[in-house]
Image (cartoon, grey):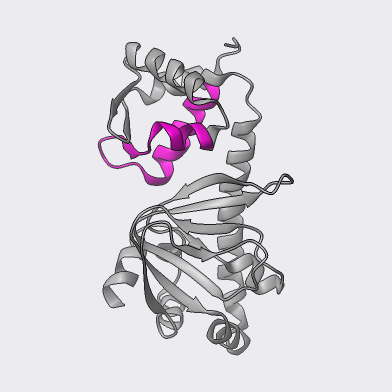
Amino acid sequence: MTHALGVVGEQGWFSERSAETRKHLAGIAKLRSFAKNDLVYLAGDPPNGMFGLVSGSLNISIPRADGEDYTAHRAAAGFWVGDLALFSQGPRLVSVRTAEPTVMAHLPAQELTELVARHPHLYADFYALTYENFRVAFQIISNLAISSSDKRLADRLLLELDGRGDEYGWVSLSQSELASLTAVSLPTLQRVLRRFTAARLINQSYARIQLLDHEALERLCRDDGKR
């Protein structure tokens, strides 16, 4: 548990908390392991606490009106989720599944509720988490509003790099996953990726994409032309 909290303490919301807050949360945290494609919780479920991603990755899905789920976000280490339903005492709004074998720190609902009742100043920390998760959600929504497939893909790749890219610009993401995240057809995505590769904007490997020219991708996002 100490190692796990050390990992999430290096990036994301937990890393920005005070030593006092970290100590309070560490006192109730439990370590949980999941296999690939395990369901962490389902939209509509009652809240059972918060989860912090130590290793692996998560798919965050939103239920659609047709009964299917839309995978809106792939989260990496340092990501925390579960606060909104817990503190609003409402059902889960999203579904969370593991994209690979995953380890998470779990803050159980009862223990966390009791902790905040004893230390109400901790509410400010959870407001900060809600703000950060809404910031990402708004970025995702704005990406889907981009009509140009080239600009939408460039914007999404930059978003993925910022959230979970490595120091060499690689993002672990298959073509089918990226097509789902950007809500474009796989053939359309593949055509755009070929153009990006030919222009030396990206490099492709198996289930990975490397961003080679961040500035050019950013300029493409700002370009008034449409494709």
Q: Position of residue 108 (x, y in %)?
A: 51, 80
Give the quarter of the figure containing the N terminus: bottom left
Q: Residue at x 26, y 72 (%)?
A: 3
Count of all numbered marks drawn on residues in the image? 0
Res. 158 in view: no
Instruction: Judge whether residue 161 is colored magenta.
Output: yes
Q: Is residue 192 left or right of residue 83?
A: left
Residue sticking out furthest to the front? 67
Q: Is residue 194 left or right of residue 131?
A: left
Give the quarter of the figure containing the C terminus: top right
Q: Quadrant of residue 119?
A: bottom right
Q: Residue at x 39, y 68 (%)?
A: 104
User: Does residue 107 sit above or below 56 in this rendering?
Assistant: below
User: Does residue 54 sit above or below 105 in this rendering?
Assistant: above
User: Does residue 216 sit above or below 124 in this rendering?
Assistant: above
Instruction: Judge whether residue 85 is colored magenta.
Output: no
Residue sticking out furthest to the right? 65
* Secondary structure, magenta segment, majority class: helix
Res. 169 in view: yes
Q: Position of residue 41 (x, y in %)?
A: 55, 66
Q: Residue at x 52, y 46 (%)?
A: 73
Where does the magenta region start and end?
151-180
Q: Position of residue 58 (x, y in %)?
A: 44, 55
Q: Position of residue 87 (x, y in %)?
A: 66, 73
